[in-house]
Image (cartoon, rainbow, N blue to C red):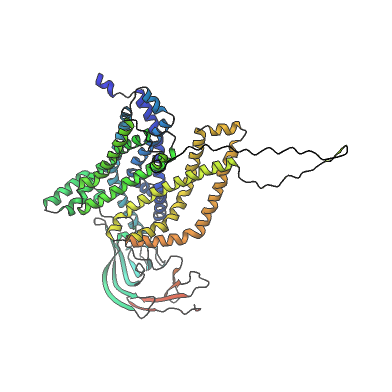
Amino acid sequence: MKATGALRPTLLDRYVVREMVPPTALGLLLFTFILLLDTISNLMRILVSRGADLGTVLRAFLYLLPSIFSVTIPMAFLLGVLLAFGRLASDSEIVALRASGVSPARLLRPVVALSVVAGLVTFYVVGVALPAANQAYRELIFKLVISKARTQMAARVFNDDLVPGMVFYISDIPARSGEWRDVFIFDGRVASKPQVILARTGRLHVEEARKSVGLDLTEATVYSFNQIDPADFHLERMGSGYQPLPYEQFFPNVALAKGDREMSLAELREMVRRLQARGKGRVDWGRYEVEYHKKFAIPFACVVFGLLGLGLSLGSKKEARSAAFGLSILVIFVYYVLIRLGEQAGDTGLLSPFLSMWGANILLGAIALVLLYLNHREAAFDPLDPSHYAILLTKRYAIVPGVRRRPAPALRSVPRRGARPVVVVRIPRMRLPLPGILDRYVARSWAGHFLLVLAAFWSLFVLVNFMDLFDEIQTNHIKGVTVFRYYAFFSPGILHLLTPVGVLVAVLITYGVMSRRNEITALKAGGISVYRAAGPVMALGAAVCLAMFGASEYVLPPMSREATRYLNMIKGRPVQASSVESHRWVLGSDGRLYNYDYLGGSPSTASPSTTSIRSAGSSATCSTWRARPGTG
């Protein structure tokens, strides 16, 4: 009975848990929403263009949630601990607990208990839900692509949305056989060497077991030419052949092969055992062992983050919600960078799989224990107060600023002439409605929180994006300057996407802090309405809206094009030959297919480049030329 009573949560335990749960839930929603912003837009654009219905879009969205939750659950728990104990410390409740004989070690019990719950949920997401969801997402995308290719390929229509960079034109598709007749294919995926394929018949060939897609063509002729040099022209007659269509051309960010991240714990252990039995080295089976330890290390990070958050916030002497928010992003950034570097070192055999995955937990756990020890010894150090770091380098002197008051205007004697007074009429000086003290105070507070929140959101977004691209950066041997340029051109789009959320969060923090400090009550007591206090933020919000409009009109389009170009370099994709807006195919009345490409970007002023192709059954002729300036 005594043992059971010792495990029963006390009033203090329930109180601490109630303080941690709301900010943790809020952080989970906020971080998940931020990471889903770009994913939702890309997913909707791709799936809708493939003809997906609402049910398919919702299923794809649900399949992506486990990969997001595996990152946001530990992050949200760290933020919840920092905010909860930061609030307790700012209200001197930690001091009251110590005065009542409650040591900081006593507060470990609710934190560890809740961190174990968060760790178990994360373990289920990483170890069970994530592999199944990733594989289900790949199956869903494959079926969607095949359904699109089989059912929505229309005759006598230029189909350019099946594979990016390719155009299909089919003269006839009999309903009974479904075979393509008189097939024309333009392959512009390689800008330097576009190809034109003409075939008598064709059929889409799908192997669902191997997840492969291709074209079976008969009496095919392949024309390879150079748009810049018309003399560089090659012709190859294939007769009958198979034209593969790589799956990654349909969805560049989705791979069909079941990798180590889609394997369960049992499958990973079986793969390691099988490779070791064959006499393979660590380089061959190391990545499977690394993934096995990763499925345990990331959930255990919830316990480490709980201890670290408690150690960071116990010594806080003031309310530091914005500092806690930024600090949580910083800790997460350091942790996942260490995890990613350790994963790469473990895959290549530089470190053991155990150390590569558990090294980040060991390092941050040691820091957490040191902070808890300092708080137990009641060391005068506040980890959330920047002045405690600056005091180590500079001396701070207390300066009490004097309050300068405007002197009252001196009373001037009224000039008199005899007994009759002289009336003096003064015209008040015209003054522009400059911002007052209240406006400057609210604007300065909001701007500081807005910049901090936006920087934190940007760091989180870039961190997750970099983690997704890390393998391709290593595989394709991309230089650091290329990665830097990609994020330099990609950042304006990220900031434009995150700015509305940053404005909302900054408003909540600003007026929440003012309400916490009873400043809103003081304003009301001074005769200042809440609407007047909201005026500065409304004005700044309007300025942000105008800036976003100007950026979307003049800054984002060229930046987005450059970011896409560098992203293609990182992913090893060929540069696209031309854009959809400037590249056109038409069928002439004489049966010829005409291709024109606007070179100057404006159809009214640019000179066209024309390609004419005529197909008559299996025999085909192709002629290409480049139009002179000023000619049609």
Q: In the displayed structure, would residue 96 be above or below residue 218?
A: above
User: Along the line of sight, which residue is nearer the eye, 240 or 214?
Assistant: 214
Q: Position of residue 240 (x, y in %)?
A: 26, 71
Location of the N terminus (image quadrant): top left
Quarter assignment of residue 66: top left
In this view, 182 is above or below 85:
below
Answer whether residue 206 is visible to the viewer in this image: no
User: Taking 12 as reference, is 262 left or right?
Assistant: left
On the question of residue 419 being in view, the answer is yes
Q: Nearer the viewer, residue 612 or 173?
A: 612
Residue 580, x across and y down, in percent: 43, 65
For the point 39% across and 49% down, the residue is 459
Along the line of sight, the residue nearer the viewer: 156 or 330? 330
Q: Front-most of 266 and 317?
A: 317
**Residue drawn at the location 22% of the way across and 50% of the way down:** 346
580 vs 176, left or right, is: right
